[in-house]
Structures are given as C-alpha cells and as structure tokens.
Image (cartoon, rainbow, N blue to C red):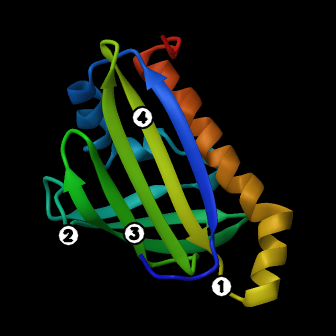
Amino acid sequence: MPEMSHYVLRREQRIPRPIDEVFAFFAEARNLEALTPAWLGFRIVSVNPLPIQAGTLIRYQLRWHGIPLRWLTEIQSWTPPTGFVDVQLKGPYRLWYHTHSFEPLNGGTLMRDEVRYALPFGPLGRLVHVLMVRANVEAIFDFRAARVSEIFGQEFPNT
C-alpha cells in the first residue's frame, strides 16, 4: 500500500452464520448494492472477470451529495474464505484500500473491515473530510452493519 497521510476506519461484526456462507455472500459483487445506502444511488456497472478473483475489476456509479461519480476498484488479493482486498484505481479518493477479513468464531463468523483512505486536494480535502466525508463513510458502514444483521441475523455475544 502506498505511503501517505490517510484516515483509517475499522469495523468488526460477529455474524451468527458459518464463514463459508458469509464469504460466499461477499464474493457476489452484486450483493454490494444491497449493503449500500440508497442515498448514494450506488450501482455496479461491470465485474470482470467473473467469478471474482485477484485482478477482477469492478466499475461502479454513484451520487455523492448530488455529484455523479464513477469508481473503479480492483480485487488485489482474494483468499477464500478468509478475506480479500479491494483497491480504488480510479475514483473520488486519493487512496482507498479496503481489507475484508473473516474468521470462524463459535460456530459463526467474525468479520472485520479496515479501510485506509485519503482525499485529494491537500488542506481542502482535510477540511471536507472533517465536515462531511468522515461522517458519510461511517454512515455507509453503519448501514452495512445493519443490513448484514438483517440478512444473517443479529450479532451473537463475544464468548
């Protein structure tokens, strides 16, 4: 991953379903639309090649506060059923490096996300992060966690 000043978002969720089932859900790119808030107008344009593997390119369109954006990510690492990494090649961020990891836990799955991201435009980008982007990224991952709970069931306690 490139060295630069960046922000980090970390999330962890316990899912009461087996790791193979959880990973299979995340291995289907179209499911990302179901995990993204409607206010983003998020749509997958293409996934190539399928099935997903290291090197797969995924093209998206979305709207951020009314601004239409195109986004291209590459699956940089693919290690079923324990994880994958997607990296922005073109899009709104200067850096977007998202590590998804999964591990079996008490008959269910512990899912972790770590997103390292940076904005362009130097000081202006830092201001926009404080005013809007940080809250938006957190809201997107809050929505995602709620949808994962709806799909797979509520988190189970850490025992």
Whichever of callouts 4 and 2 sits on the residue coming sooner in the sequence is 2
Which residue appears at 46% of the width and 72% of the height?
71
| C-alpha separation, residue under disc 4 versus residue under disc 1 | 29 Å
Q: Nearer the viewer, residue 107 or 30?
A: 107
**Residue 46 point in image, percent of width and height:** 29, 64
- The dot on residue 84 is none
Residue 37 visible, this orientation: no
Dot 1: within a 10 Å radius of its alpha carbon, few (fewer than 14), some, or many (20 or more) residues? few
Whichever of callouts 4 and 1 sits on the residue coming sooner in the sequence is 4
Residue underneath mark 3: 87
Q: Nearer the viewer, residue 1 or 27?
A: 1
Look at the picture and state if 127 lies above or below 33: below
Which residue appears at 61% of the width and 53% of the height?
9
Q: Are marks 4 and 1 in contact (CB under 8 Å)?
A: no
SS under mark 4: strand
Residue underneath mark 2: 55
Residue underneath mark 1: 120
Whichever of callouts 3 and 1 sits on the residue coming sooner in the sequence is 3
**Residue 39 point in image, percent of width and height:** 66, 49
Camera-nearest label, 4 or 2? 4
Please, what is the three-letter code of the amino acid marked with disc 3?
Answer: Val
Residue underneath mark 4: 111
| C-alpha separation, residue under disc 4 versus residue under disc 2 | 22 Å
Which residue appears at 86% of the width and 65% of the height?
131
Look at the picture and state if 4 lies above or below 106: below
